Amino acid sequence: MRQYLGVLGPYIVATAFFILLAGGILSRLVVGPGRLARFYLLFGLAFFCYAASWVIAYLTLRSLIGELLGSLVGTGLMALILAGAFGAKKALTRMMPALLVANSAGYFLGRVVHEAIGGKLGMILFGACYGLGFGTGLGYALFLAQEPIRLRLGQSLEDSAPRP
């Protein structure tokens, strides 16, 4: 793919696929009307910022330090965007470390598996590890981000319940 799309091409394609596929699946975790379109916009922005941070750090440093820095900065930006969009700034202290640990665990476990097995199977297993780790972190981040909404929904249900 690099031969046809250049250095950035594969990263752009991977980012687009991740946004398209994961955005549709993860949107089901979001509460409210019009969630699919709203979430695609939010997730598209958050994941693009994550991916851009990672690619810039990696291509600048071309090392494990670049991967770690990209993961740290990218997941931090993603957590800030999600918390801001859902009005859940208090959740950041739990969201950032959880997202970073899940993303890094999936990515670096996948990297170890890929290096141990190699070839197409290694790359597929890398993708599976990364997707499971990052997906778990994103699911938990969305759960935390919607905590204020769940609390308000719970209060409004209690307020509208019939009194004995």
Image: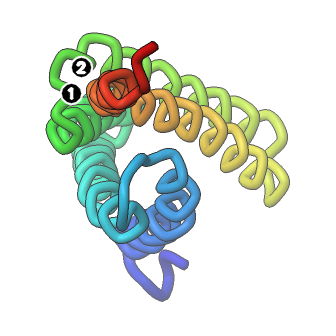
Is residue 125 depicted above or below 140 in this figure?
below
The residue located at (24%, 19%) in the rendering is 92
SS for tag 1?
A: loop
Which quarter of the rendering shows the C terminus? top left
User: In the orientation shown, which residue stands out farthest toward the bottom?
Assistant: 4
User: In the orientation shown, which residue stands out farthest toward the front?
Assistant: 164
Closer to the camera, 41 or 125?
41
Are the residues tagged 1 and 2 within 8 Å (C-beta)? yes
Q: Position of residue 55 (x, y in %)?
A: 31, 52
SS for tag 2?
A: helix
Q: Position of residue 87 (x, y in %)?
A: 16, 34
> To which quarter of the image does residue 8 belong?
bottom left
Closer to the camera, 55 or 92?
92
Q: CA distance from mark 1 to mark 2?
A: 7 Å
**So how many labels did they put on this image?**
2
Which numbered dot is residue 92?
2
Q: Position of residue 124 (x, y in %)?
A: 76, 54
- Per the image, the residue denoted by label 1 is 88
The residue located at (28%, 28%) in the rendering is 152
The residue located at (40%, 75%) in the rendering is 9
